[in-house]
Amino acid sequence: MQIEKSLLYQRILIVAFWIYATTGFIFDEIMPFALPLRSPINLILDIIIVILGFSTLKNRNDIIIILAFFFLGFISSFIANNLSLFFVLNGMRDFIPFMFLIPIYRYFNEEEDRKERFIKALDKALLWFLIVQGPCLLFQFLKYGANDHGGGSLGNWGSGTITTMIYLISFYLINKRIDKQNLLRSLWENKLYILLLIPSFLNETKIGFIFILMYFFLLLPLNRKIFLRVFIAMPFTALFLWLAAYLYSASTSGYMGNVFSIEYYTQGYLLAQDDDGENYAKWLFEEDSAEDKYDIPRFTKMLLLQQINEEHPGHILLGFGVGHFKGGTILAESDIYKEYEWLFFGSMIYLMHVYIQLGIIGIILIALFWIMNFAFFDKKYKRDYNIQLFLILTIVLIGFYNDTFRNLPMTIVFMYILSSSISLKDDEENKIEE
């Protein structure tokens, strides 16, 4: 029996999502003996996404942006930094697979029947994905406590990514069903999606408190009455924040109980200072820390990057080439990784991740990628502004907090919600606007 091409593509994408989004927990907690298979499986899944992307690539803007990244990666890696072909191809997995998701979603949106079937299937998968996070995060919380091990089905060290995904998916699903004119009643009727946020309190991802504010604020209708509705919503948001902070403090007692103090952020968390106020990161340039695997705070890395630029000048525009974050499993680590291992290990903000590999030009190209795919200046599209604002704020948060766009399940979700927030206007709407 021959399967329709669009249905085959749909099943491949959803199966790839489930494999990528659950093997982390399976290998970490259920089958640790199979952990060496994780990298090859992820590589195969990346290749599958690229093949699907090539099969659906038609839009001129998509072709231009993908070719631009290939060209920049080639110039930065081969010409400026003399990296090997396989090293660079492996490193491009940080950028290329999620760019191919846009043409894949364009393909599913081309025909109404195809679009309706795809949305129904993927929405169902996303709801089940939220439900699965409950037992996974509870297991990790009981085993490790409230820390970065709480990555849910993504596995250990995926706390920031899973928290972002939980809020993205829940907001997307509830926003489709909410009646903004009867907000309180509608929230109660759709309380399941709010309850599915609770597992995100079981790890130590502080970005969740910002997502809570975004979540409830952007469920409000964006019109002239917004300020009144914000005033009405403030007590409920404050109550929810207080409950979240209480649960978080209780779960991290004895570990990070001072998380709400200003000293925690200005000294310990952001700038890596000890109790006496001394910056203890300066020894990184004097001592060999390769065996310590110490997770230097992400903002401290930004401060120290200036000294790296002084020691290795000429990389501001084009970066150090792609692939440094992918070495060590399939391919050998790069020389720059071996010299500054502490820089690549642990927490990293996305802007810095792009800058290190592709420099300032890479950051500009990433910005153009988002501008083009939000279709900011194209009047033939109508959009869900609540969803789009949530996505834009998420991009800003990721840019300055973590690098979750490197995670394929996260980008599958993000690009799907982005594609769902934009649709072509019909002929009557275009006539009215004209």
Image (spheres, rainbow, N blue to C red):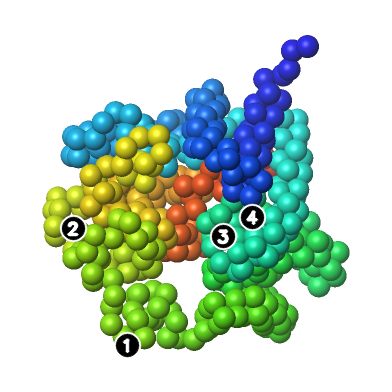
Residue 276 — which label? 1
Most distant residue in the top direction: 1
Measuring 51% from the left and 47% from the top, which residue is drawn there? Answer: 407
Q: Position of residue 432 (x, y in %)?
A: 65, 48
Q: Secondary structure at mark 1?
A: loop
Q: Earlier in the sequence, mark 1 or mark 2?
A: 1
In the foreground, 15 or 369: 15
Residue 297 left/right relative to 388: left
Task: Examine the image and state in which quarter residue 152 appears.
Answer: bottom right
Task: Examine the image and state in which quarter residue 345 appears.
Answer: bottom left
Relative to residue 101, is residue 395 depicted above or below?
A: below
Residues packed near mark 2 inside 10 Å, few (<14), some (14 to 19) or many (20 plus): some
Task: Examine the image and state in which quarter residue 424 appears.
Answer: top right
Kindly report the distance in space between the C-alpha atoms of the residues bearing marks 3 and 2: 32 Å
In the foreground, 315 or 109: 315
Q: Position of residue 85 (x, y in %)?
A: 29, 28
Measuring 19% from the left and 50% from the top, which residue is drawn there? Answer: 315
The amino acid marked with disc number 1 is Asp
Residue 152 — which label? 4
The amino acid marked with disc number 4 is Gly
**Disc 3: which residue:** 149
**Disc 2: which residue:** 309
Q: Earlier in the sequence, mark 3 or mark 2?
A: 3
Q: Position of residue 105 (x, y in %)?
A: 60, 36
Measuring 24% from the left and 35% from the top, which residue is drawn there? Answer: 83
- Asked whether residue 74 appears in the rendered view, the answer is yes
Q: Nearer the viewer, mark 1 or mark 2?
A: 1
Most distant residue in the front direction: 33
Q: Secondary structure at mark 4?
A: helix
Kindly report the distance in space between the C-alpha atoms of the residues bearing marks 2 and 4: 37 Å
The amino acid marked with disc number 3 is His
